[in-house]
Amino acid sequence: MKLIVQKFGGTSVKDKDRIFNVAKIITDTYKEGNNVIAVVSAQGDTTDDLIAKAEEINPNASKREMDMLLSTGEQISASLLAMAIESMGFPVISLSGRQAGFVTDSNYSRARIKKLEPERMEKELDKRRIVIVTGFQGLNKYDDVTTLGRGGSDTSAVAIAASMHADLCQIYTDVDGVYTADPRIVPSAQKLSEISFDEMLELASCGAQVLHNRSVEMAKKYNVNLEVCSSLERVPGTKVKEVTKMEKLLIKGVAKDDDVVRIAVIGIPDRPGIAFRLFSLLATKKINVDIILQSIGRDGTKDISFTIPTDMRHTALELLNDNLDTLGAHRIEVDDDVTKVSIVGAGMQTNAGVAAKMFEALFEADINIQMISTSEIKISVLIEKANGVKAMNALSEAFID
Amino acid sequence: MKLIVQKFGGTSVKDKDRIFNVAKIITDTYKEGNNVIAVVSAQGDTTDDLIAKAEEINPNASKREMDMLLSTGEQISASLLAMAIESMGFPVISLSGRQAGFVTDSNYSRARIKKLEPERMEKELDKRRIVIVTGFQGLNKYDDVTTLGRGGSDTSAVAIAASMHADLCQIYTDVDGVYTADPRIVPSAQKLSEISFDEMLELASCGAQVLHNRSVEMAKKYNVNLEVCSSLERVPGTKVKEVTKMEKLLIKGVAKDDDVVRIAVIGIPDRPGIAFRLFSLLATKKINVDIILQSIGRDGTKDISFTIPTDMRHTALELLNDNLDTLGAHRIEVDDDVTKVSIVGAGMQTNAGVAAKMFEALFEADINIQMISTSEIKISVLIEKANGVKAMNALSEAFID
């Protein structure tokens, strides 16, 4: 008997019709003789509504209480989905993150999974029950609920698939696979039948919102058989694999990430160890830094700019301003009006002209580049937010169409 | 240092203003040097909204999944209340029923508390934290969430007070104490400064919705120092005690319970053991039967009528119709158009004229009595629903004004 893990996002369970649609996918898989574990996110806007409720009461609420609050969202969708499956006459049980055995660290609101204790899930599968698990959450050593942060439900699903050696882990979304670019932005974007873990990782960290990179990292590490598919159309999705077969496409995708803020630390003394001190400081608050740009020294000082996710803006600014003296910096500047556009593809490392072609395409679209970051399989640029869509289309035209 | 347990119902935490009002009551009590454990219900209509969501999906959802769903309501209000208290600068933590140590049986949707393991609460109090506990819920031996049924949060609060030997257990509601009748129905109703456990029990089981009888039973058993007070006005409430001082009032209260259905089992063979068989059958589904009326036998058959809470209507009818043959009954009839009106008072047992005076008052108000039930300290009658308010006023006028 095969074990199939299926993950359904918030839009896939947003109302009664969608819940029954998901229930149909799950029970069809079960009827084919498989064991099924389904991981669900909170319905539609539930999480945002709960956050709004909390902000009305206390905009600086502790993350511990936020997690207590937000974890209810998945509990509601999981129990409703179980009720739908019950009404169709199948044996089913919903389990919270705690009951499913998710043990995390105590980093509230962005906890990491330390281990999974799948005994309860195994027991329920042994009874041939369909198991519904609340994504996005676990329990720490203090016996308190934690949430896994953005993309947490993807990570929950992959963790279950990895730990229980599932035969397949399907991530159901409202698109039918991974595209070379977001088809809502770039109409000519093409669907990929498969993509490598590394390419998916770069696409995910560059803002393609199909799969969160934590889940892809974990899938790669444990070699989970991953597939991205649509909960609305029964068509083959995109398989994410260790190595993909050679394809003609040099560039696998163009991605845009608006969820980024550029911070500049101005006037730091130009001596060794300053960058180390700055980024160690940011690390203490678990602030993920992406693109880094360091200016050439001048008048004995230099500037360091870097990008961080928007939700870390407040934490980072507070931290840096509190430590202006320690860093010896003059001031902190922040720019919200930026977006990160990236091209991704395993083929580019052996092809010297890719970067030049990218910059040319942007130049011809009259787009100014503020920062550049490259890896073996991707090139990202930071540009003015208003130019994001134009840049994606220019790059798709240059590389993919 | 005193320990004070305070319970706040759904209307007391229904929105931001009410939550801060409750936070003020709690922190004022804390500032006076007391340890405080606050038990909260779900906000306003949350529970009803969740039930509506479930019924849309599956009107016959399992109680296990309903409890999974409904328990989120208190988790939301508890974390929001903790956030409000945080914003006022006090140390606070919210705990779920599981974390607070509520161990229950597995009777989903109406679980009984088996024991309370208060170690976590004690640990938090030792840190001088205000502890917010989700009422209405616990955990069973299968590690699954259960809810305690109607009045569950009152029961949670009293259980904590009993188990932790609290100095006082305050039940905050939107009225400022226990009245001789619902002041919204009987404008001339009087507030009682104190009432005995037994009188409170009769009033509660007769539909006075101030305190649920399970909580009063438990308070009586463990001699918990109980007080009913208003979350809106800072005035002395009603103390519920073992023995109250002699008061002039013979009748302590008039209560009405609309949450009642009359069921008639028609044409049962008139032989011994039938009543036993019928009520054993109802007991298997934990259906609480209140007033029972058995007709005189005629043509070798008799009829048995009884009342049950409205929420057991479906379960009872299904059960009885499935067992028509076993019971040898002709058919089952149901009447929703009834209400139960009661008078309560410890003085009545030594006063023979009370029942007669009650029936006279109803007769003069032109109200027909369908069933009668008496105990040492109360008399209940079942009447047509439309006459409920008229009956309460007639009885208040006759006995209390």
Image (tube, coloured by chain):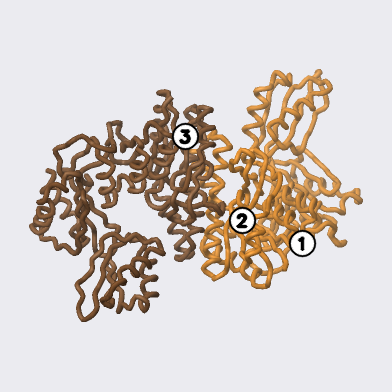
Chain colours: A orange, B brown
In whole angstroms, how far apart are the C-alphas of marks 3 and 1?
46 Å
In whole angstroms, how far apart are the C-alphas of marks 1 and 2?
23 Å
Q: Position of residue A100 (x, y in %)?
A: 63, 53
Q: Is residue B162 shown left or right of residue A131?
A: left
Do we see residue A371 in this rendering?
yes
Residue annotated with mark 2: A133
Three-letter amino acid code of the residue under disc 2:
Val
Judging from the image, mark 1 belongs to the subunit labelled A
Judging from the image, mark 3 belongs to the subunit labelled B
**Label 3: how many Cα within 10 Å (few below 14, some 14–19, many 20+):** many
Q: Position of residue B85 (x, y in %)?
A: 47, 32
Give the residue drawn at x 41%, y 37%.
Answer: B161
Q: Is residue B126 shown left or right of residue A99?
A: left
Q: Which quadrant holds residue A81?
A: bottom right
Residue annotated with mark 1: A239
- The secondary structure type at the circle numbered 3 is helix
**Label 1: how many Cα within 10 Å (few below 14, some 14–19, many 20+):** many
Number of the front mark, 2 or 3: 2
Do we see residue A173 in this rendering?
no
Q: Is residue B291 shown left or right of residue B318?
A: left
Q: Are marks 1 and 2 on the same chain?
A: yes
Q: Determine whether A125 is above or below B47 in the image.
A: below
Three-letter amino acid code of the residue under disc 1:
Lys
Three-letter amino acid code of the residue under disc 3:
Ala
In whole angstroms, how far apart are the C-alphas of marks 2 and 3?
30 Å
Number of the front mark, 3 or 1: 3
Residue annotated with mark 3: B84
